[in-house]
Amino acid sequence: TQLLEQSPQFLSIQEGENLTVYCNSSSVFSSLQWYRQEPGEGPVLLVTVVTGGEVKKLKRLTFQFGDARKDSSLHITAAQPGDTGLYLCAGVPNAGGTSYGKLTFGQGTILTVHP
Amino acid sequence: GAGVSQSPSNKVTEKGKDVELRCDPISGHTALYWYRQSLGQGLEFLIYFQGNSAPDKSGLPSDRFSAERTGGSVSTLTIQRTQQEDSAVYLCASSLGLRGSSGANVLTFGAGSRLTVL
């Protein structure tokens, strides 16, 4: 069973601060995704990282995939109240080199950004 | 439809009763997934349908849980003899499901069905 350890579980910060969320595993993943979920809604995909060492930027969000494809991080610069939500990482299993959609999710990080 | 539709959005039931949760995936998506989410937590995989293949039921927590997908489209998750620990949000997702393609990994989730067992 592949597990993803996500940390921290809770983050409460002031507007303008920076933060980093980590996602770690002992397993290799074909790719890794980050989702954001708001109350009463389903998770929405933010980004997929595929290549070891890959860095992707989405405005103030920077996503990195570890060289060994076992870990990932999400860094938010100058957080805004609109960034508040539950952030989830999800790993796509490395099944024989053919990837498919049965994702393993981390426990999630509840981010609160205060004005 | 344009998105994944789930019903009911909220269900309150008494312990021991059976419940059915419905998912209507995005048209053309061959893969359909059910996940369970406890309050503010990550998602627990339940079951996965891909086209006409036998479903992957490896995540179902007990034999009280079952799911079917009729005509490769709508899916129903059934929980028999509900217990209080079944209380959670049940999320359905669909994807293009083309094994080996990037589309297989892009899941679109519904808003979920919140189940409360009293």
Image (cartoon, coloured by chain):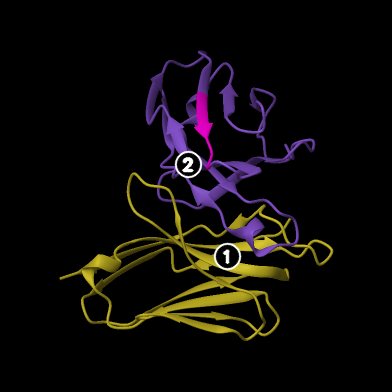
Chain colours: A yellow, B purple
Return the chain for callout 2.
B
Magenta residues span B21-26
Q: In the image, is residue B22 part of the stretch drawn in magenta? A: yes
Task: Name the residue rendered at 68%, 77% in the picture.
Answer: A69
Task: Name the residue rendered at 56%, 53% in the picture.
Answer: B107
Task: Name the residue rendered at 74%, 36% in the picture.
Answer: B55
- Residue with the mark numbered 2: B4
x%, y% of residue B105? 63, 59
Q: Which mark is residue A5?
A: 1
**B51 left or right, relative to A64:** right
Q: Nearer the viewer, residue A44 or B26?
A: B26
Q: How far apart are marks 1 and 2 (CA)?
A: 28 Å
* Whether residue A81 is situated above or below residue A1 in the rendered picture: below
Task: Name the residue rendered at 48%, 26% in the picture.
Answer: B84
Q: In which quarter of the image is residue B7?
A: top left
What's under tag 1, amino acid-wise?
Glu
* Whether residue A24 is situated above or below residue B8 in the rendered picture: below
SS of the residue under disc 1: strand
x%, y% of residue A78? 27, 82
Q: In the image, is residue B42 part of the stretch drawn in magenta? A: no
